[in-house]
Image: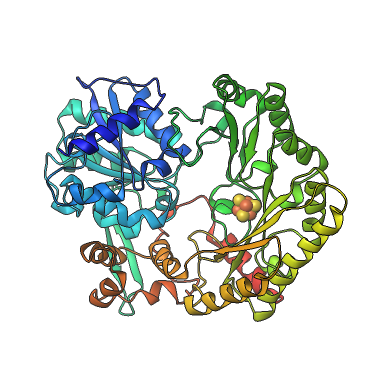
Amino acid sequence: MAWNIKKKYLDLSAREDSGQKKIWGDYITVCLAYPNRYRTGMSNLGFQTVYRMINNHPSFLCERVFLPDPEDEEAFASGSTPLFSLESQKPIREFDCIAFSIPFENDYPNILKMLDMAGIPLRADRREENTPLVIGGGFTVSLNPEPLSDFFDLFLLGEGEGMVPEFLDELEAVHKGGLSRREAFHRFQTGLSGAYCPRFYQIDYKQDIGIESFKPLDPSYPEKIKRRQVTLIDDFITDQCVLTPETEFAGIYLVEVSRGCHRGCRFCASGFVGRPARFRTQKGLSPSIDRGLRINQKIGLLGTAVSDTPDLPAICRSIIDGGGKFTIGSLRVDRINEEIAALLRKAGAETVALAPEAGSQRLRDVIHKGITEEHIFAAASILLEQGITNIRLYFMVGLPTETADDIEAIIDLVKKIKHHAVKSTAGKRSFRLITVSVNQFIPKAVTPFQWQPLEDINNVRKKMKRIASALRREKAIKVIHDLPKWNYIQALLSLGDRRVGKILLAAHRYDGNWSRAMKEVNVNPDFYVYRRKDVNEILPWDFIDHGVKKTLLIRESEKAFRDV
Ligand code: SF4
């Protein structure tokens, strides 16, 4: 074992405040894996929630593992040191189960890296009876797990609160009964709603490489797998259970306020699979907020539709009355009013993020954003009036039906907001900065835009350059944008079927060289990324019952393009 890495892990553990330390004994052991660095993983509330849930089960012990820091990767990759857990520094292949919590497609390559570093066969069908079970869950894999199917024994699809405790009970029964791996998988697939063992499903392809059929290998397995969703989020607590200064949100105590969204922006999966939107009440949240205030932390209010939360003003007031401060990730433009802005100001907020997404009204209507230029100016005025002097604006490029005029409209809108800000703060506390964040639209499963192609990344590069150069000379405006090259890979991993796993495996073997992997594997990536799909074709994720009717998605898609 590399002693310098062990020392680093001991130091990280020592700086944590968790109150949950179980000692190895007769427990069934789970290593909860986050396919990115410690700082990122420990900022993820979903990851922390699963950690708490597993350790709360009396028969289970849960430890954590993260992608090693870049300077430590070599030691693990060389095989001299097998990947080990943070808490006890045990090699993760000694655990009974390795559970990956996977929030983003861009982290998929890290899963293969970590399995390799752990000395666990990458392909599920090469694992032996005593290999740990490798399971996965999280938002993106619950939308479409197929590109990862070759590497996982089991996926748990949907929200974890109901399903994880049931899975743990099943796993305990498997251990007590001394079942083989295959018997265990059979038990999960037949008895656990939301479970998906890819090996039990057969896919046939058409000549043009589309999907012909997707069938269970045994009549006792469900044809459609239900994505699990909880009904009342006030029934449980979702807040940080491990505190550490080593995170992206150091000094902020994260609590979940809302889940899902009913707004139905046509590019956004949360607006469809997350229906109905669910909100916590002030009463339900008060134990979490009290804990955060007791430990003197700023409260980070998280959720997909925080600003739609009916109790939001009361929640914010209770934090301020308790002598605390809070932050909110992003607010819907049409939900900003004097009351919320004043509370934000009292809480010490200096920056507020708004997401117009598109510059022209025509394109905002296509994506069903549901806001107008009047909403945007009104929100900016209210924020500035309260002395919030930094505004972050989110835009997307490459949206369906977008033209050069829509790109110019982004530039015009940003300039207009800036002039409006300068004018309305004249003689008062001066306005500081507009940060314009530009990202490429990436089609997502289970949205009305799931049939749309990704726009050519070379065009997108030019559009991003145009926006950046048009705003370069403007004082108090800063433009940041993502790298289109990685958007192609993200789209491939979002929209792909099982064959995309071959490209992922090759990219891993070629040390992240995706161009070489895509050339050498006999699967055409453009088929998934740049092709407009037919509404009648079988999509890779159609075997999952996401609780959204395809007819609704088709209707929304037709509405989007009706009047353009
Ligand atoms: S983009 Fe925001 S408001 Fe729109 S559906 Fe998604 S979460 Fe809701």
Compared with 101, 167 (above or below) is: above
Above or below, 365 against 401 in this view is above
Residue 335 percent across, percent down from the top left: 75, 47
Q: Is residue 339 left or right of residue 478?
A: right
Residue 60 screen position, x and y as percent: 28, 25
- The residue positioned 47% from the left and 37% from the top of the image is 45
| Quarter of the figure with residue 82 | top left
Q: Quadrant of the C terminus?
A: bottom right
Query: How many numbered callouts?
Result: 0
Closer to the camera in the image, 48 or 267: 48
Q: Place residue 291 in its image quadrant.
A: top right
Quadrant assignment for the N terminus: top left
Q: Quadrant of residue 190?
A: top left
The residue most toward the right is 427
- Examine the rendering and report whether any part of residue 217 can be seen: no
Instruction: Please state if 477 lies on the left or on the right of 209 as rendered.
Output: right
* Front residue (pair 192, 526): 526
Q: Residue at x 74, y 33 (%)?
A: 346
The picture places residue 550, in percent across and down from the top left corner, at 53, 61
Q: Position of residue 400 (x, y in %)?
A: 59, 73
- Residue at position x 40%, y 46% from top? 157
Measured along the vertical axis of the image, is residue 125 above or below residue 282? Answer: below
Q: In the displayed structure, would residue 406 be above or below residue 483?
A: below
